[in-house]
């Protein structure tokens, strides 16, 4: 592919490749005019544009698609994970402690050592590090190391000393176990307050660059008082608006008590009062709220908001015309959300509730009843297929926490799509990495075959679905008049894949009239981004190889 030299052109003709577009399933060329798609069509028709544009790009057989929209990201934490201590690759507890010691020695100037990604269910020791072990590994310095799900963390004694009153908060374990609940939130605030503005901006910039290199053109930043800070969100939105890179849509996860609260949330630049507004926690940390006890713990997890509080928040947001949203994973938490939204609809009107597309993050333990409720109430399910790829299966973490039978019910994407529940795909990075094609693959090749959806449906949910979840119906697709947000890919054969194993799972027959996508069968090489363009501006271009 011929790389463009200017960062931005007036009119650009891309030709000689494949353009994934509902406007023309056989398209090989596209014209953009500034920040908008102007035309899509065949190679022969492209000749008439060649002399009237500012730039011609020879695709050399590459694929052009809409840029991906990741519907759930924690940008600063992603950047800190990319540039900091990564414990996701630690094979054992001893390995994790050794990596921590080495990182502490290599970074003597850091006020707090930050790390992410440990997962005791993957280690032969079967447990996280104790506080005493972490004190020894860090030489007694403040350290905050999050579990892979970011709903618990192990910390050093020196970090606890920075958090007045933490030992009296819910979720504190005197014996040195991971912090959860209020204790974890307090420790996280203290750790993040130690990050300098320069470190934070560098982390955000690193995350946005990485996203662009993966063909991601927009991110939904799920911020909130228990996750980051107001300065973190406003700084990120200003950075994204001021430099070439992916678009960022901000969500602020704080329950509103009145319209003044909503005005303040809007003043932050957020488009929604939601995202990770916690109704419960996570399965890995035993804090997801369940109807029946965990298989490996004698309790049902933790609920943070009940149906009445959910109803108050949704009704207030609906009256103000702002999108609400919640984090809900366990079946009891999801049921509390649907009960609360239904109560809000009785007060504010069902049509008004549906029109705002209130959203639920994760929505993992769905039942036939809650799926029907989502469809009726117009709730968007912001889901992360990589969770199933990482923790699903007969021997995965889900099965450990819930038992194999309950674990098989998780993330039922096919039933949700059949019921008409809108899906928006994301990563929850750094919980699972930014990896859009891997995310589409995980949805199409779900570990439970009955929950699989087609590659086309998953791709749509990871492009157009993210824009729709943010209230935009005109984007996330390549068609005349749509935003010129697209990615160019080096890939293998284009096929049409379906999730039903009773029939051939792919086809290259052009008579279907369905535009093809890359073959994502497990084991095949995923596409490589050659260029990412946002609003007509090149935000990533892979160097010539």
Image: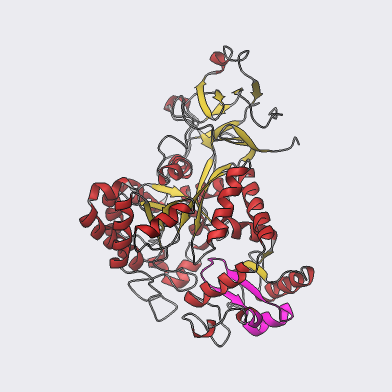
Q: Examine the rendered structure and indicate whether residue 195 appears above or below residue 301.
A: above
**Position of the N terminus by quadrant:** top right
* Residue visible at 62% across and 75% down in the picture: 124
* Residue visible at 60% across and 58% down in the picture: 76
Residue 81, percent across and down?
64, 61
Residue 301, percent across and down?
40, 75
Q: Examine the rendered structure and indicate whether residue 450 appears above or below residue 23.
A: below
Using the rendered view, name the quadrant where residue 364 is placed. bottom left
Q: Is residue 491 visible?
A: no
Q: Is residue 131 magenta?
A: yes
Horizontal side of 414 relative to 268 (left or right) equals: left
Q: How is the image coloured?
A: secondary structure
Q: Is residue 241 magenta?
A: no
Q: Examine the rendered structure and indicate whether residue 492 appears above or below residue 140.
A: above
Residue 193, percent across and down?
61, 68
Using the rendered view, name the quadrant where residue 526 is placed. top right
Q: Which residues are magenta?
A: 129-158
Horizontal side of 354 relative to 167 (left or right) equals: left
Extreme residue in the front direction = 260
Q: Is residue 537 visible?
A: yes
> Which of the pair 229/139 is nearer the observer?
229
Extreme residue in the left direction = 346
Using the rendered view, name the quadrant where residue 294 is placed. bottom left
Numbered disc total: 0
**Position of the C terminus by quadrant:** top right
Residue 344, percent across and down?
26, 58
């Amino acid at each position: 592919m011929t790389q463009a030299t200017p960062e931005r052109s007036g009119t650009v003709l891309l030709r000689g490749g494949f353009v994934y577009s509902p406007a023309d399933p056989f398209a090989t060329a596209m014209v953009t005019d500034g920040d908008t798609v102007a035309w899509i069509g065949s190679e022969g028709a492209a000749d008439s544009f060649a002399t009237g544009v500012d730039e011609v790009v020879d695709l050399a057989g590459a694929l052009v698609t809409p840029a991906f929209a990741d519907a759930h990201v924690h940008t600063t934490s992603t950047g800190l994970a990319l540039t900091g201590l990564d414990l996701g690759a630690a094979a054992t507890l001893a390995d994790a402690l050794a990596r921590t010691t080495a990182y502490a020695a290599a970074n003597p100037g850091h006020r707090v050592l930050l790390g992410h990604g440990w997962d005791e269910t993957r280690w032969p020791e079967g447990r996280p590090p104790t506080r005493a072990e972490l004190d020894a590994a860090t030489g007694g310095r403040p350290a905050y190391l999050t579990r892979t799900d970011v709903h618990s963390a192990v910390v050093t004694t020196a970090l606890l000393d920075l958090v007045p009153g933490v030992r009296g908060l819910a979720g504190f374990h005197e014996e040195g176990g991971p912090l959860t609940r209020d204790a974890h939130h307090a420790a996280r605030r203290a750790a993040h307050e130690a990050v300098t503005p320069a470190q934070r901006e560098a982390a955000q910039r690193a995350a946005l660059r990485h996203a662009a290199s993966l063909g991601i053109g927009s991110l939904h930043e799920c911020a909130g008082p228990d996750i980051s800070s107001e300065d973190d969100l406003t700084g990120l939105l200003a950075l994204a608006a001021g430099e070439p890179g992916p678009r960022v849509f901000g969500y602020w996860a704080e329950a509103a008590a009145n319209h003044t609260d909503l005005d303040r949330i809007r003043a932050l630049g957020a488009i929604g009062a939601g995202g990770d507004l916690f109704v419960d926690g996570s399965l890995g940390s035993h804090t997801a709220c369940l109807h029946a006890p965990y298989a490996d713990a004698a309790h049902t997890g933790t609920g943070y908001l009940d149906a009445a509080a959910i109803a108050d928040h949704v009704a207030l947001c609906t009256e103000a015309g702002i999108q609400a949203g919640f984090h809900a994973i366990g079946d009891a938490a999801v049921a509390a959300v649907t009960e609360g939204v239904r109560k809000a609809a009785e007060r504010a009107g069902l049509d008004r509730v549906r029109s705002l597309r209130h959203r639920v993050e994760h929505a993992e333990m769905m039942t036939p009843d809650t799926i029907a409720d989502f469809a009726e109430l117009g709730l968007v399910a912001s889901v992360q297929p990589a969770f199933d790829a990482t923790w699903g299966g007969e021997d995965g973490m889900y099965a450990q926490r819930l038992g194999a039978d309950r674990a098989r019910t998780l993330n039922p994407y096919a039933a949700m799509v059949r019921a008409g529940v809108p899906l928006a795909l994301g990563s929850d990075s750094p919980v699972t990495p930014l990896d859009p094609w891997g995310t589409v693959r995980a949805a199409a090749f779900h570990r439970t075959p009955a929950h699989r959806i087609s590659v086309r449906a998953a791709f749509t949910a990871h492009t157009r679905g993210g824009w729709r979840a943010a209230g935009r119906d005109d984007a996330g697709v390549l068609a005349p008049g749509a935003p010129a947000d697209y990615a160019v890919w080096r890939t293998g054969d284009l096929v049409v894949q379906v999730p039903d194993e009773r029939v051939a799972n792919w086809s290259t027959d052009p008579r279907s009239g369905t535009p093809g996508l890359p073959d994502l069968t497990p084991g095949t090489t995923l596409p490589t981004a050659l260029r990412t363009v946002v609003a007509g501006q090149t935000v990533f271009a892979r160097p010539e190889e």
